[in-house]
Each structure stands twice: as C-alpha cells, then as structure tokens.
Image (cartoon, grey):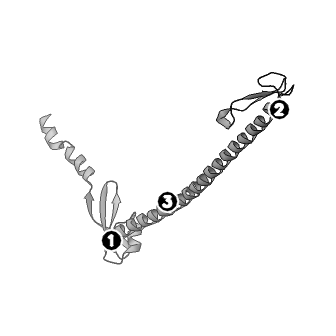
C-alpha cells in the first residue's frame, strides 16, 4: 500500500490518501471519485507553498549578497584608511625628529646637519647631544632619561657606606 499525506505546515490540509480500498483514505473501489480532486488540490497548494518559500529564500539571498558586497567595500575602505594613517604617522614621526634634531644614529645626524649645527641621538637611556664639527660628531653633553636619573638617585653613596661600615 502506498499513501501520501499533505501536512498543513507545508500548505496541505493534513489528509492522507492511499491506493487501497480504505473507506476513509483509499482511492480504490470508487474512492477516487471523492478523494482524487482534493488530493490534486493539496498537491497544487503544497507546490504554491514551496514556490513562496523559494521566493523568500531568493529575496534573502539578494539581501545577503548586497550586505556582503557592502562589507567587502567597507573592508577596502578600512584597509585604505589604515594605510593612510600608517603613512601619516611615519611622516609625523619623521617631522618631529627633524624638528627636534633627534636622529637614530650619529651618522644620520651628521648627514642631516651642516658644520656647527647641533643634533641629538638616544644612546643607552641617555640623549647625547653632538655638534657637527667639520663632518665629525663632537660630543657636547649627555642628558639622562627619567629612568636613568631614578636609578642614579637610588644608588647608595659609596663614601657614605664606607664610613658607616
């Protein structure tokens, strides 16, 4: 025996139709006269339900595709903005170093200054000031960082400790 049920959640009426002679569901023994057209009607109703759900899924896909394209565009904008910000930060750092006359190495300071000009180079917790003296870096003074000053102040006085002990 074969049977078909048309569930209400899919557009059917909830009835079951069979190919036997069952007096309530069967199509045999003239059952088709009363149940064949309703069975076809259920098939059409379920097909309409499936078509509606397919259209809804298609609409959702279009919305998702548009949102995806917008996200890709936003990502591109963000990458471009990050790149622009990185370049601007590097330029600002270089400008600040040039304005302060601070260079990463004495050779850089010499190549960027002329005879008699001063420049500074960070060296081991200090800021060493140099003068360009005919292309040679002449040390002028050393400025201690805050960390170096604290370390120096926290060091015990050797003369005082030798007197106590």
Identify the mark nearer the N-term, 2 or 3. Answer: 2
Q: Residue at x 78, y 28 (%)?
A: 17
**Helix, strand or loop for disc 2:** helix
Q: Nearer the viewer, residue 100 or 34?
A: 34
Mark 2 or 3, closer to the camera = 2
Whether residue 153 sits left or right of residue 77 in the image: it is left
Q: CA distance from mark 1 to mark 2?
A: 99 Å
Return the mark for residue 78. 3
Position of 21 relative to 121 (above/below): above
Q: Residue at x 77, y 35 (%)?
A: 39
Q: Nearer the viewer, residue 89 or 24?
A: 24
User: Farthest residue in the right direction?
Assistant: 29
Query: Dividing the image into 4 quarters, which one contains the C terminus?
Result: top left
Residue ID for mark 1: 99
Residue 146 percent coordinates (x, y): 25, 53
**Helix, strand or loop for disc 1:** helix
Residue 139 percent coordinates (x, y): 30, 66
Identify the mark nearer the N-term, 1 or 2. Answer: 2
Residue 82 percent coordinates (x, y): 47, 60
Residue ID for mark 2: 33
Identify the mark nearer the N-term, 1 or 3. Answer: 3
Q: Residue at x 23, y 48 (%)?
A: 150
- Asked whether disc 1 touches disc 2, contact meaning CB atoms under 8 Å apart, the reply is no
């Amino acid at each position: 025996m074969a049977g078909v049920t048309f569930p209400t959640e899919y557009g059917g009426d909830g009835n079951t139709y069979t190919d036997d002679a069952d007096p309530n569901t069967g199509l045999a023994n003239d059952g088709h006269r009363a149940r064949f057209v309703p069975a076809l009607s259920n098939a059409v109703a379920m097909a309409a339900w499936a078509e509606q759900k397919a259209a809804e899924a298609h609409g959702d896909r279009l919305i998702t595709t548009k949102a995806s394209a917008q996200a890709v565009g936003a990502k591109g904008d963000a990458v471009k903005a990050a790149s622009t910000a990185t370049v601007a930060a590097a330029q600002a750092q270089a400008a600040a170093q040039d304005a302060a006359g601070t260079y990463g190495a004495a050779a850089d300071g010499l190549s960027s200054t002329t005879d008699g000009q001063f420049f500074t180079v960070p060296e081991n917790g200090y800021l060493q000031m140099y003068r360009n003296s005919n292309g040679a870096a002449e040390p002028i003074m050393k400025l201690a960082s805050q960390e170096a000053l604290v370390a120096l102040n926290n060091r015990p006085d050797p003369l005082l400790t030798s007197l106590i002990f």
